[in-house]
Image (tube, rainbow, N blue to C red):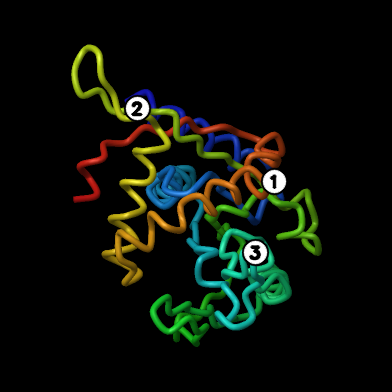
Amino acid sequence: ALQEKKIAKIAEEIASRKGVKLVLLAGPSSSGKTTSCKRLSIQLAVNGLKPLQISLDDYFVDREKTPKDASGEYDYESIYALDLDLINEQFNALFRGEEVELPKYDFQSGKSKKSGNKLKMNDNNVLVVEGIHALNPELTAHIPQEQIFRVYASALTTILLDNHNYIPTTDNRLLRRIIRDYKYRGVSAQETIHRWPSVRAGENKWIFPFQENADAMLKYGDVFMSWL
């Protein structure tokens, strides 16, 4: 209930700011961004807005264009793994009232494809965009800042096993990511665990430094079993 009140308060603040067309929701991997995005969208609708949800995961460049890290592996945590030009182009087109077709990223083939999902904004629409890089200034470098409201979702909840033992937040997020990658991206648990150090390094470089840019903080603590 307290969590829902916090989300409702954030939605009220967004609705009170005239001219806001873009809500950005960021946070580390598997911190509950997608769930928070859905719940925030519900509360925005309560306040008379019509939210349109977009995931930055669909704006990945084709795999062969993805930058590589020091070990020569694809660096999916880098902001340059996203098509920044397309993001700014499509978002600004939407703000002008134009219709755009959103991309859809196929994680198994590593290709960006047309989704067939076309969007057009009206006066009471607001874009709600979630992704690990949502608060990075480079993401929206060509979008007027007065049109943006930023939210940071922080994963702070641990899972208590008994009175003396618990699963740390970082391990909890890894478990969530293993399940998500297997169910939705066709990635094995072994591969997810192999990539985890790179994910953690990417968070320290690309996510945590920008959390202070947020207009609102959301301490997220859902139940791990909801992923099963």
Q: 109 and 7: which one is in front?
A: 109
Q: In the rendering, at what x and y percent does residue 74 appear?
A: 57, 70
Q: Marks 1/2: CA distance?
A: 38 Å
Q: Secondary structure at mark 2?
A: loop
Q: In the rendering, at what x and y percent does residue 184 appear?
A: 31, 67
User: Label 2: how many residues lie within 10 Å, few (<14), some (14-19) or many (20+)?
Assistant: some
Q: Is residue 94 visible?
A: no
Image vertical order of residue 197 relative to residue 217, above or below: below
Of the numbered discs in the image, which one, if any, rests on residue 69? Answer: 3
Q: Secondary structure at mark 3?
A: loop
First-in-chain label (3 vs 2): 3
Q: Marks 3/1: CA distance?
A: 41 Å
Mark 1 = which residue? 18
Q: 51 and 198: which one is in front?
A: 198
Q: In the rendering, at what x and y percent does residue 175 appear?
A: 31, 46
Q: Marks 3/2: CA distance?
A: 31 Å
The residue type indicated by label 1 comes to Lys
Q: Secondary structure at mark 1?
A: loop
Residue shown at 55% from the left, 64% from the top: 56
Q: For residue 36, which quarter of the picture?
A: top left
First-in-chain label (3 vs 1): 1
Q: For residue 97, which quarter of the picture?
A: bottom right
Q: In the rendering, at what x and y percent does residue 31 appear?
A: 44, 43
Left or right of 9 in this view: 182: left
Labelled pair 3, 2 in contact (Cβ < 8 Å): no
Q: Is residue 9 visible?
A: yes
**Outermost residue toward the top in this view:** 163
Left or right of 85 in this view: 175: left
Mark 2 = which residue? 158
